[in-house]
């Protein structure tokens, strides 16, 4: 925060008064920077190094060659990305109306809705996935209901359908909260002005609310996508081996095949995908920011 | 006004005089203060008055130590305080937003400064009680700021600033957030308190009414300098610059030239009027110079002749008549330019019958017509 | 409610059901009298709760999770609070960069962190499972804490700090007597969220725990691989109960309503 003279002459100089303790500054920042450097950057570096190991001895990119040279692994990567896109799209469409409702409801209803939206986050992801197993499984709630009305059993477990449903459930709160917080900051007077100018409710929504709330959707989408392609518990429990994604593959390579360098290389690949996405998003934001007046 | 020194409020304050010399403060390319000189005598109440961005708050914060000047010095009781950290300056300060500690009750808020000085227990309690009594908030020790109204919070802030017996009291637009009636009563209270305690006070405001009614002296600031520092009446009647004349009260402003005056009296030619008008002498203006001339609307008499000599008569046509309760302002188109004349609401007396379109004569005394050197072409 | 469409409310109700379904199902399934998981359950019984509460293979991990969560949150708080204060007061030129660096772990999938940490611990000879777990969980939770405290401190009215200074408080006194009490509610909200993050975490725990330090999610997970009975439902219900009770307690004590604030 720079010290500038604001328009009314008031100087936001609170920070300058603390020049007396630069040591305090260092003392405050050093521990956390150290911890993050050692226990976050360290592992990432070690991971990268590990991925360069080859069975024959000399370091090289052989592991990456294995990944990108094999159709199966490429397919897994593709599935992971596709899975991410599908889950994100569903979350965006399903979550948006809820986010709108949360942002625009009265105080008490809003508190209740937020509670409902946040409640799933309070429960362990393993437990949540387990809950879905109970609901979607062969002897589960859905099939019990289907049987009751004479319909055949639906195969919802151990396939992409069940996994997607469960994943959407896990990540929906993030999308809803992101949309809600953006819509909340939207000045309702803009919508009122549009109405006065003659726009119907639908047009107000389509031309005013929706475009202005897109930012919340995008933020939520980035978050949901990143979490989806990095998630492995839900897919593991609800898909077993039928639905293979990169994180589960990494886990398998690590524990079942004990192929550390290979697992490390896949980890770097996954990290690359996530980082690439974030970088693209930041670049897009920057470009859009310049486009706006 | 100097009540000597002892530790507490009521028993006297350790007030001091404050000297500001050639004070500068820049932020990059912006010069918030451009070499300010000001001396505030012990026990004096000085108002720093000016529009947004004039540097008055910066100046106050330099005195408090919250902003470090980039040049010049500040002395309290003859001792320079450059380099003395904020918490050692022994001043009292009241902020516009009150800045009461929300997690402490009133008693703890007021006692905070005492606690920092090692005064605790019964002694502290006594002084807190005394301070609350001074601001008419006795018995409020256990309340929390959130439970108080704006005016009450401001009083507590004042008590908190005074309880330690500071060398000077600094106030940064303290009444800005209060409504008009409350503001007026707080102004009166503050002035009374200040006179009683004799504490050196520096008060920042953008409201000229506030400054003129409370201060012993008013320092009118603009763009980082003090244009005039004088008693309120002199600021009003004898402004030194056009800015001061226009910022304080209302003024009719004309541009023209200083003509050769007979018997040493200044006469000015303004607007399209051919006959010159007598004005008050200003040694800074020489014959032939461009000048700015100003007269206050309330000094203009309508429809009179003679009276104060020398004066001149200006004829004009009424183009507007504005009723503001206690006065009426009449706007005239004259050969000199547009003239605004303010007269006390005449009720049914003379002046009440003037209508738009009437042609009337107005006059004003030469002594009320001040001139300043004009801007170069 | 303020010109919102009734169709929207129907949708909200439906979606709420969807959001709460697994939780309700799990809780209800734990009370079944039968021997298998089914929904709707057959009969009402507390036998599964009894079984679970007596089983050290569940109680031990529960205790481990609690311990780990509290420890990680504590460490994260101690790291994040001074850092946030230093960042905002110090007006450093590289502040943005430092913040981005410290918040980076938020963007990395935990499986990658877990794998990396596994290798790292092996490399530097860190044998204590709890220490490695703690390190991993601190790395995961500290960005949440930092982001929360930064938000709270940046939004605070800093005039009270200046007022304290003028009244004679030294910088450390200002921090201790004024700043910290002021930001406390926000810090607590962040701490609750951090605790939940740690309590819920699977990837790091899965890879770094041993039989002594197993956490609850891991033990449930491994149980599920071989078994599929209401015991899981019972222990899950207990876990939910703990979280709810803790939240209610904290709400009563500190009046912290805004979890939403921390989770953004």
Image (cartoon, helix red, strand yellow):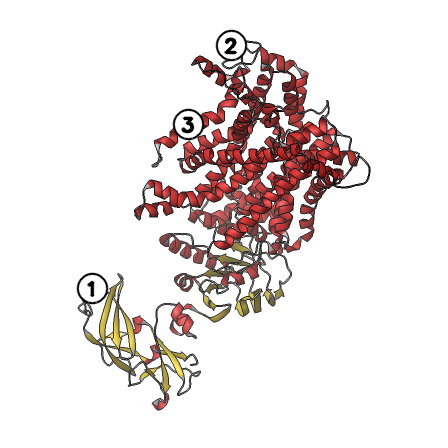
Q: Contact, CB < 8 Å: mark 3 with mark 1?
A: no
Image coords of residue B266 (percent x, y): 36, 85
Chain under callout 2: C
Dot label at residue B254: none
Image coords of residue B89 (percent x, y): 60, 57
What secondary structure is found at the residue carrying circle 3?
helix
Q: If you read the primary sequence from the N terminus, does the residue marked by circle 2 or circle 3 appear first? A: 3
**Mark-to-mark CA distance, 3 and 1:** 69 Å
Question: Which residue is under mark 3?
Answer: C13
What secondary structure is found at the residue carrying circle 2?
loop
Question: Which residue is under mark 2?
Answer: C42
From the image, which quarter does the C terminus of chain B lie in?
A: bottom left
Residue A45 located left or right of residue C232: right
**Mark-to-mark CA distance, 1 and 2:** 93 Å
Task: Confirm whether residue C188 shows in the render.
Answer: no
Q: Residue at x 76, y 30 (%)?
A: C128
**Mark-to-mark CA distance, 2 and 3:** 27 Å
User: Which callout, 1 or 2, points to the residue nearer the camera?
Assistant: 2
Question: Which residue is under mark 1?
Answer: B347
């Amino acid at each position: 925060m720079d010290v500038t003279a604001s328009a009314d002459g008031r100087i936001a100089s609170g920070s300058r008064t603390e020049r007396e303790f630069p040591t305090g500054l260092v003392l405050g920042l050093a521990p956390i920077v150290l911890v993050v450097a050692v226990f976050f950057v360290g592992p990432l570096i070690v991971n990268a190094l590990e991925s360069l190991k080859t069975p024959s001895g000399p370091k090289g990119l052989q592991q990456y060659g294995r990944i990108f040279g094999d159709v199966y692994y490429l397919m897994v990567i593709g599935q992971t990305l596709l899975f991410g896109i599908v889950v994100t799209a569903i979350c965006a469409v399903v979550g948006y109306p809820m986010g709108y409702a949360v942002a625009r409801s009265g105080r008490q209803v809003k508190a209740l809705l937020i509670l409902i939206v946040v409640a799933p986050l309070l429960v362990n992801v393993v437990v949540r996935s387990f809950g879905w197993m109970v609901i979607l499984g062969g002897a589960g709630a859905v099939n019990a209901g289907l049987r009751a009305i004479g319909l055949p059993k639906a195969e919802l477990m151990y396939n992409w359908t069940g996994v997607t449903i469960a994943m959407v459930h896990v990540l929906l709160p993030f999308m809803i909260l992101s949309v809600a917080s953006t819509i909340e900051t939207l000045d309702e007077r803009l919508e009122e002005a549009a109405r006065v100018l003659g726009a119907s409710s639908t047009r107000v929504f389509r031309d005013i609310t929706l475009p202005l709330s897109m930012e919340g959707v995008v933020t939520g989408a980035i978050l949901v996508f990143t979490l989806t392609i990095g998630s492995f518990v839900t897919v593991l429990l609800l898909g077993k081996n039928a639905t293979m994604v990169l994180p589960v593959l990494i886990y398998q390579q690590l524990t079942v095949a004990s192929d550390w360098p290979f697992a490390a290389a896949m980890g770097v690949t996954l990290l690359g995908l996530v980082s690439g996405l974030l970088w693209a998003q930041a670049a897009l934001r920057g470009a859009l920011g310049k486009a706006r007046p | 006004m100097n009540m000597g020194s002892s530790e507490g409020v009521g028993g006297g304050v350790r007030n001091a005089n404050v000297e500001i010399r050639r004070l500068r403060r820049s932020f990059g390319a912006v010069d918030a203060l451009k070499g300010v000189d000001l001396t505030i005598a012990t026990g004096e109440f000085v108002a720093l008055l000016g529009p947004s961005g004039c540097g008055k708050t910066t100046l106050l914060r330099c005195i408090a130590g919250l902003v470090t000047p980039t040049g010049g010095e500040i002395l309290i009781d003859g001792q320079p305080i450059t380099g003395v950290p904020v918490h050692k300056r022994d001043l009292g300060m009241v902020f516009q937003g009150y800045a009461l500690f929300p997690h402490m009750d009133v008693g703890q808020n007021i006692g905070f400064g005492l606690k920092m000085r090692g005064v605790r227990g019964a002694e502290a309690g006594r002084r807190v009680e005394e301070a609350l009594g001074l601001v008419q908030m006795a018995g409020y020790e256990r309340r929390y700021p959130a439970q108080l109204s704006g005016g009450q919070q401001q009083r507590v802030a004042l008590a908190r600033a005074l309880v330690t017996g500071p060398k000077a009291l600094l106030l940064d637009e303290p009444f800005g957030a209060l409504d008009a009636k409350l503001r007026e009563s707080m102004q009166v209270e503050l002035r009374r308190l200040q006179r009683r305690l004799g504490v050196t006070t520096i008060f920042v405001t953008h409201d000229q009414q506030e400054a003129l009614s409370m201060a012993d002296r008013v320092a009118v600031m603009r763009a980082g300098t003090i244009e005039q520092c004088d008693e309120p009446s002199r600021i009003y009647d004898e402004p030194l610059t056009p800015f001061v004349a226009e910022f304080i009260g209302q003024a009719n402003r004309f541009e023209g030239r200083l003509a050769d005056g007979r018997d040493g009296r200044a006469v000015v030619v303004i607007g399209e009027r051919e006959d010159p008008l007598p004005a008050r002498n200003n040694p800074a203006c020489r014959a032939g110079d461009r000048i700015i001339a100003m007269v206050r609307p309330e000094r203009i008499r309508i429809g009179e002749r003679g009276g104060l000599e020398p004066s001149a008569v200006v004829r004009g046509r009424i183009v507007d008549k504005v009723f503001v309760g206690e006065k009426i302002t009449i706007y005239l188109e004259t050969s000199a330019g547009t003239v605004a004349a303010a007269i006390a609401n005449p009720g049914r007396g003379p002046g009440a019958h003037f209508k738009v379109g009437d042609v009337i004569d107005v006059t004003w005394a030469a002594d009320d017509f001040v001139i300043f050197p004009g801007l170069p072409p | 409610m303020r010109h919102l469409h009734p169709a929207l409310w129907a949708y909200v109700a439906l979606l709420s059901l969807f959001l709460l379904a697994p939780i309700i199902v799990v809780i209800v399934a734990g009370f079944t009298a039968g021997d298998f998981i089914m929904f709707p359950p057959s009969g009402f019984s507390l036998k599964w709760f009894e079984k679970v509460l007596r089983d050290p293979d569940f109680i031990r991990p529960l205790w481990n999770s609690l311990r780990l969560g509290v420890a990680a949150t504590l460490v994260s708080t101690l790291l994040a609070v001074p850092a946030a204060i230093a960042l905002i007061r110090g007006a450093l030129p590289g502040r943005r960069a430092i913040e981005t660096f410290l918040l980076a772990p938020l963007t990395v999938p935990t499986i990658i962190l877990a794998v990396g940490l596994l290798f790292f611990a092996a490399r530097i000879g860190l044998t204590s499972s709890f220490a490695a777990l703690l390190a991993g969980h601190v790395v995961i939770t500290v960005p949440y804490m930092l982001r929360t405290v930064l938000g709270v401190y940046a939004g605070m009215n800093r005039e009270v700090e200046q007022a304290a200074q003028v009244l004679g408080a030294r910088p450390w006194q200002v921090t201790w007597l004024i700043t910290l009490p002021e930001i406390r509610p926000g810090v607590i909200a962040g701490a609750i969220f951090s605790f939940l993050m740690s309590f819920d975490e699977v990837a790091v725990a899965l890879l770094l725990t041993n039989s002594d330090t197993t956490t609850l999610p891991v033990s449930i997970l491994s149980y599920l691989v071989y078994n599929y009975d209401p015991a899981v439902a019972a222990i899950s219900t207990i876990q939910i109960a703990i979280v709810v009770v803790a939240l209610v307690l904290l709400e009563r004590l500190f009046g912290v309503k805004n979890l939403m604030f921390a989770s953004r």
